[in-house]
Amino acid sequence: MHDAQRPADPRRLEANRACLALPFAHLNLRYNPFGELPLELRPSLAVLDPEPFLARLAPLRAALQFLGEKGRGKTTHLLALRSARPGVYVHLPEDGPLPAVPLDAPLLYLDESQRLPWRLRRALFAGPSRLVLGTHRDHRRALRWAGRPVVTVKVGDALDETRLREILERRIEAARRGPGPVPRLTKRAIERLLARFGDDLRGIEHFLYERFQALDAPGDVDA
Amino acid sequence: MAKCTLSIVLDPEREAYALGEVISGSVRVTVDSDCSCNALNLALRWETHGRGNRTHGPESVQTLFRGTWRAGEEHAYPFSFEIPPGPVTYHGHLLNVDYFLRATADIPWAIDPKAERDFLVVAPPDGSLVLTGAESDPQHTHSLETWQDLQAGAGAAAVFAGVVLLCVGLGLLLVGGNLLVSAEPVEWFYVAVGGLLSALGAGALYFGLRNRLAERKLGPVAVELRPRRVPPGGVLQATIHFTPRTSLHLNRVRVRLRGTEVVVSGSGTNKTTHSHDLFSEVATLHEGGPVLAGEAQRLECQFALPPSAPLSFRAPGNSLRWNAVFHVDVAHWPDWSQQVPLLVLPPAEQEEVPAPL
C-alpha cells in the first residue's frame, strides 16, 4: 500500500521534463543571483573602492588584514584587491594538504591566514612580502612584532542600507538576461534584511536565494 | 573600455538541442576602434549553478579568428559544434545544469570582450549519449550484495569508532569528575568534553549495532530492488525477506523511494551541505502485528516513477540521488534499516523492467 506520493515541487518536475524554458527567463535573469558564484566573477561584484586599501600597501613589508566572521566578505575583499593589483593568491583549506605559500612573493593575498602553522607564519611575517590577509584571528601583534606596518579592516562594519542595496543590486544585474525589468528589492526589504541578519551577508544571500526561487515574475520583492 | 563588442547568434534560432546534434551559428563582432586580436575563441560546455559550488564539464573550444580589426567593421564568424555526450539540461531547486556557448576575444592591453549564450539540451529519442556522472559512481557499479557488504563494513567502522569514543569519553568523565579522588574539585571542562564524546560514542555504537541487534530477532534480512537502473516513468519492484528467530510484534515495514538534490557550498569552515527532496513516496509492506518465529516473510511492492522524474546526476559538490530506504520497525526493539541507491537513466540503458504485480 502506498501511503503518500509527494513530489516536492510538481511545477519544477514538469518544467524539467519539458525543458522548454531557459533558466530564470521568467525573471529576465540567467541564474539565481544569490546562488554560489564562480570565483572569477566575485571581484567584479564587490562594492569596494580598492584604491584607499592599496594605498596602505605602499610602505615596504606593509600588511593589510581583513578581519571578520565567516560570511562577511573577507574573500571578496581579497579577490577585488587582487583584480586591481595582481599578486599571488593562496587560500588555506581547513583540511587536506597545505598549499605552497611563497615566502618571497612581492605581494601575497593569503585567505584564511589563521590556519597558517606557527612556524610558517613566523617565517612569512619575517619575510619581505607585502601581505593582504583574510582572517578570523587578529594577527596585529605578531605582525608588529615582525616589524611590519599593519592596517586592520573589520569587514562588515560599514554595512548600511545604501551599501547593502548596492551589493544586492549588483548581484541581480550580473544575472540579467536582457533589457527590461528584473526583480527589485524594496526599501522595506533592505531594512528588514539588515534588521534580521545584520552584517551576515551570507545569511542574506541564503534567504534571498529561496525568495528568488519562488518568484513568478519580475517586480518588487519584499522580504 | 572594450574595443569591440561580441554577440552569439544561433542558426537557426532555437533554444533546445539533443545531445549529438550540431549547434551552429555565428559570433558577430562590431569593432569600435582599431585593434589586433590574438584569438577569438568560442567554448561550449555544461555547468552547474544554484546553491552549490559551481562545477563544469569538459570544454570544447574553437578558435574562429586571429588578426587585426579596423574601427567600424562588422564581422560574422561561423561556428558549429556537435554537442558531446553529457548530462541533459536540468532545472531544480538547489541544482541546475545548463549548457553555455562563450565567446572571448583576446585583445592585448585592453579589456577582453565576452559574450555568452545559454541553450537547452535534451536526451536524444533513443536515450543514448546521456552521461550523468552517476554511472561510474561505485555505489551504482557494485552489485547489491557488495553494496550490502560495504554498508556492513561501515557499520563495523562505526562500532569501532563508538567504542574508542566511549572509552575516551568515560575516561575523561572519570578524571574530570574526580570520581577516583573525591577530595579534588570537579574539572568541568573535562566533564563536558567527556560527556560529549561519550554521547557521540554511544550514538555511533547504536548506529553500528542497530541492524545486528534487530537481526537477533528478525533473522538475516535480505532486500532486493529490481531494476537498479530505471527510466523515468519506469516501474521498480522492492522486496524484503526475513524469517524471524523469535516471535515478535512488528509495528510496520516500509520502503521509501526518494529523489534528492544534494549540493555543497563553500569550503573549509564555510562548507555547508544542502539537500532538497524532489520526490518521496512511501509504500507500507506490512501494517504491523504479531509474527511467529520461523514464519518466512516475503514482502514486496512496486513503485512507478513519474514520467517527469529527473535523471541521476553526480558532479563534484552537486548531485541528484535516488534511493530506496527499507525500514523494519520492531516493537520494543531496535529497528532495521538499509538504504539502496538506484540510477534513473534514459530508457536505452535499462535493465528489464519487471511486469506489474
Image (cartoon, rainbow, N blue to C red):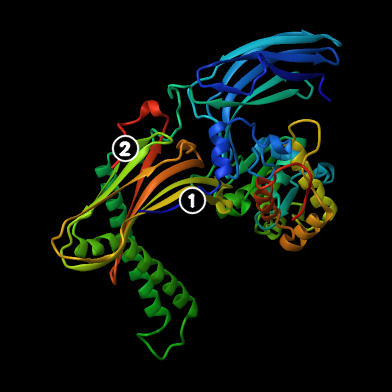
Residue density around tag 1, few if under 14, some if 14–19, many if 20 or more, within 10 Å: some
Q: At 67% from the left edge and 10% from the top edge, which residue is drawn? A: B78
Three-letter code for the amino acid on which mark 2 is drawn: Pro
Dot 2 falls on which chain? B
Q: Position of residue B222 (x, y in %)?
A: 23, 51
Q: Are marks 1 and 2 on the same chain?
A: no
Foreground of the two, B171 or B91: B91
Residue at 65% over, 57% down = A136
Viewer-closest of A142 and A202: A202
What secondary structure is marked by label 2? Answer: loop
Tell me if residue B314 comes above or below residue B287 in the rendering. Answer: above
Is residue A130 shown to the viewer in this render? no
Residue A123: give x, y in percent of width and height.
61, 48
In depth, the one of A3 and A178 nearer the eye is A3
Corner quadrant of residue B165: bottom left
Dot 2 corresponds to which residue? B227
* Residue that sits furthest to the left in the current view: B294
Camera sees residue B194: yes
The answer for how far apart the CA atoms under marks 1 and 2 are is 22 Å
Tell me the SS state at disc 1. loop
Tell me where residue B314 appears, x and y as whole percent: 46, 37
Name the residue that disc number 1 marks.
A6
Crowdedness of circle 2 by 10 Å Cα count: few (<14), some, many (20+)?
some
Residues A84 and B253: in front is B253
Farthest residue toward the bottom?
Answer: B183
Measuring 36% from the left and 74% from the top, which residue is drawn there? B170
- Left or right side of B219 for B349: right
Residue type highlighted by circle 1 = Arg
**Does residue A175 appear left or right of residue B83 in this picture?**
right
Q: Nearer the viewer, mark 1 or mark 2?
A: 1
